[in-house]
Image: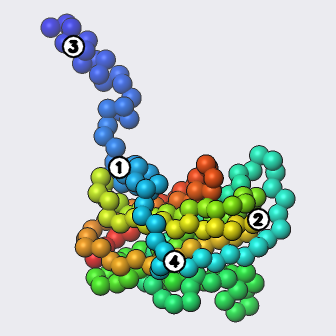
Amino acid sequence: MKRLLLAGAFGLALPAQAMAAPSWQELSEQTAQRVIDSAPLVTTGATVRAFPVSVRPASSSPTFFTNFVAAGIAQGGVPCFDCVSGVPSALGIPDPFNYVSSGTTMQYNVAWSNLSFVGTCTVSIAITSGKTVIDSASYKVPGIKGAGGFDIGLDRSRPTYSGNAVLTGKVKCGKPSSSVTAALIFQ
């Protein structure tokens, strides 16, 4: 009897995190990270925009980093730079609206800042809900020659899914990678 009580006491002494199952959000993000590097490459429905900048990054700075991921109803002409009147180098994207209505083609935008990477980057998105992969896609961006702001818009047809999801955007340039997430809800 004493052994059972001691075992129970030790079980309570463990950190709650070690005993708790991952939350839906954590599980969705883990699923995205597991599948995003094998997201199918697309050759159509992608628009890449860039604007060069002059920077002097510290030697400890990363070569690039992801700024954000957003969803909006797909429309022609975006993303774009210098397309907002009176705001130099402003980025135009579809109105961010991470609610996906039935029958809607969405544009998923991933923006990143490149400080010093030269070469080809792969930009990927994954849409997950817990252990379920709802959609994923990637696009290779060749010819990156230096510092600048970049945005890619990936147009995707609406999958047959309803409910909450997590949208993950990832940029991989060489071996390093950087990713961000946002909430997404499908009607």
Task: Give left or right: position of 55 versus 47.
Answer: right
Q: Looking at the image, is mark 4 or mark 1 earlier in the sequence?
A: 1
Question: Which residue appears at 69% of the width and 68% of the height?
Answer: 143
Is residue 97 something that shows in the picture? no
- Residue 150 position within the rendered picture, expressed as x and y whole percent measured from the top left: 65, 71
- Residue 158 position within the rendered picture, expressed as x and y whole percent measured from the top left: 33, 77
Question: Which residue appears at 34% of the width and 70% of the height?
Answer: 185
Instruction: Give the spatial CA distance, label 3 vs label 4.
Output: 61 Å
The label nearer to you, 2 versus 3, is 2
Mark 2: give few (<14), some (14-19) or many (20+) Cα within 10 Å.
Answer: some
Residue placed furthest toward the bottom = 85
Q: Is mark 2 on a helix, strand or loop?
A: loop
Task: Give left or right: position of 129 versus 93.
Answer: left
The label nearer to you, 3 versus 4, is 4
Residue identified by numbered label 2: 146
Instruction: Give the spatial CA distance, label 1 vs label 2.
Output: 36 Å
Residue placed furthest toward the left = 1
Q: Is mark 3 on a helix, strand or loop?
A: helix
Mark 3: give few (<14), some (14-19) or many (20+) Cα within 10 Å.
Answer: few
Is residue 174 something that shows in the picture? yes
**In the picture shown, does residue 64 fall above or below 59?**
below
Mark 4: give few (<14), some (14-19) or many (20+) Cα within 10 Å.
Answer: some
Q: Looking at the image, is mark 4 or mark 2 earlier in the sequence?
A: 4
Residue identified by numbered label 4: 46
Mark 1: give few (<14), some (14-19) or many (20+) Cα within 10 Å.
Answer: some
- Residue 162 position within the rendered picture, expressed as x and y whole percent measured from the top left: 25, 71
Q: Looking at the image, is mark 3 or mark 1 earlier in the sequence?
A: 3
Q: Looking at the image, is mark 3 or mark 4 earlier in the sequence?
A: 3
Observer-nearest residue: 163 or 175? 175
Return the mark for residue 5. 3
Return the mark for residue 27. 1
Q: How many marks?
A: 4
